[in-house]
Image (cartoon, helix red, strand yellow):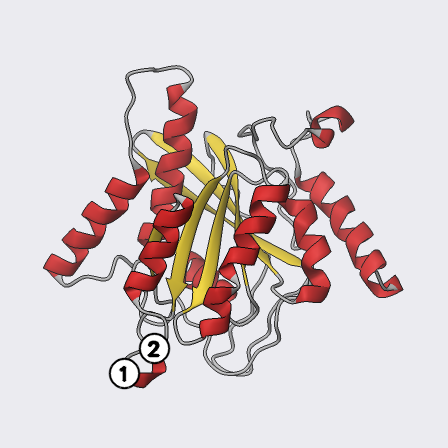
């Protein structure tokens, strides 16, 4: 690892530890892969590094310092190749905006927070936007260990990004907790004609092979963006509820299917 990467890695690791609950001790940060990642309050919501500054629209990705109250918090990571639209998806979800034009790729890790209502519970999602470049992969690995959910994105106009999802899934299996929620997302679903090189059925087959939830999104139009994060929030809330209520039932794949069908029927985009 180059000296510059070591410096970034040390700084990110320090900031990551600062973002954890103050009650976490050193032993909790050395959990094994088989130990489940538990939900806990997330504090010190400071931007780590790698803000994208777009050249158009005047939009700047800023740290989210929300003081909105919440009942439970979960860490969600966006992973996938560089350029698949991870930051655009995050900005669309958090700010309802689309980053158009040329902007700098994420360097290291960045994150934002959003509180959503799931039934009667305020769920805080701390969403981590990660670098997709190979040289930052070791940095990303360090953040897998406490993630409750991973959204793995590929670009439907880029076959290589789709092919690489198998490698990403392998890394997730190696570094993430066994009980992590995984969702495969084909982004840039607004593409049509010859621009689209990965069909919906391709993503669906891959998701079935690995037993993960699948959907397509468009950060540009907002299609299914809200649904993706809400499905994850509901699944995480359900898993926590199951520990206390054995009768609680929720199927994230069925939820996504039903909500996607409703949105298509009504002509809305779940954005």
Q: Residues within 10 Å of mark 1 (few under 14, many from 20)?
A: few
Asked if residue 26 is positioned above or below residue 256 in the image, the reply reads above
Rendering coords of residue 58 (x, y %): 51, 78
Residue occupying the point 51% across, 73% down:
59
Asked if residue 28 is positioned above or below residue 77 in the image, the reply reads above
Which image quadrant: the N terminus?
bottom right
Question: Is the C-beta separation of discs 1 and 2 under 8 Å?
Answer: yes
Residue under numbered circle 1: 193
Residue occupying the point 11% across, 58% down:
265
Rendering coords of residue 149 (x, y %): 49, 42
Which image quadrant: the C terminus?
bottom left
Residue occupying the point 61% across, 72% down:
105
Numbered label attached to residue 159? none
Residue under numbered circle 2: 196
- Tell whether 11 sits left or right of 91: right
- Tell whether 27 sits left or right of 71: right
Q: Residues within 10 Å of mark 2 (few under 14, many from 20)?
A: some
Nearer to the camera, 48 or 13:
13
Rendering coords of residue 37 (x, y %): 57, 31
Asked if residue 266 is positioned above or below residue 230 in the image, the reply reads below
Which residue in the rendered view is the most extreme toward the front?
209
Q: CA distance from mark 1 to mark 2?
A: 6 Å
Q: Secondary structure at mark 2?
A: loop
Rendering coords of residue 38 (x, y %): 55, 28
Can see residue 64?
Answer: no
């Amino acid at each position: 690892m180059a000296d510059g990467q070591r410096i970034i890695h040390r700084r990110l690791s320090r900031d990551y530890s600062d973002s954890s609950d103050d009650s976490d001790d050193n032993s909790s940060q050395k959990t094994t892969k088989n130990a489940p990642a538990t939900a806990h309050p997330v504090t010190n919501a400071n931007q780590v590094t790698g803000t994208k500054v777009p050249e158009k629209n005047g939009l700047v990705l800023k740290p989210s310092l929300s003081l909105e109250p919440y009942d439970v918090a979960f860490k969600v990571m966006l992973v996938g190749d560089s350029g698949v639209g991870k930051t655009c998806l995050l900005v669309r979800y958090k700010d309802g905006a689309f980053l158009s034009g040329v902007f700098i790729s994420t360097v290291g890790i960045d994150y934002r927070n959003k509180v959503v209502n799931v039934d009667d519970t305020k769920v805080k999602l701390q969403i981590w936007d990660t670098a997709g470049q190979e040289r930052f992969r070791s940095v990303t690995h360090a953040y897998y260990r406490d993630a409750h959910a991973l959204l793995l994105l590929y670009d439907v106009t880029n076959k290589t990004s789709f092919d690489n999802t198998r490698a990403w899934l392998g890394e997730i299996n190696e570094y993430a907790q066994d009980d992590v929620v995984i969702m495969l997302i084909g982004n840039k679903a607004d593409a049509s004609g010859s621009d689209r090189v990965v069909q919906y059925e391709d993503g669906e087959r891959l998701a079935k092979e690995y037993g993960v939830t699948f959907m397509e999104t468009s950060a540009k139009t907002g299609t299914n963006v809200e649904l993706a994060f809400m499905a994850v929030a509901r699944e995480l809330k359900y898993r926590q509820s199951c520990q206390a209520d054995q009768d609680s039932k929720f199927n994230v794949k069925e939820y996504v299917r039903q909500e996607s069908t409703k949105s298509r029927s009504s002509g809305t985009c779940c954005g």
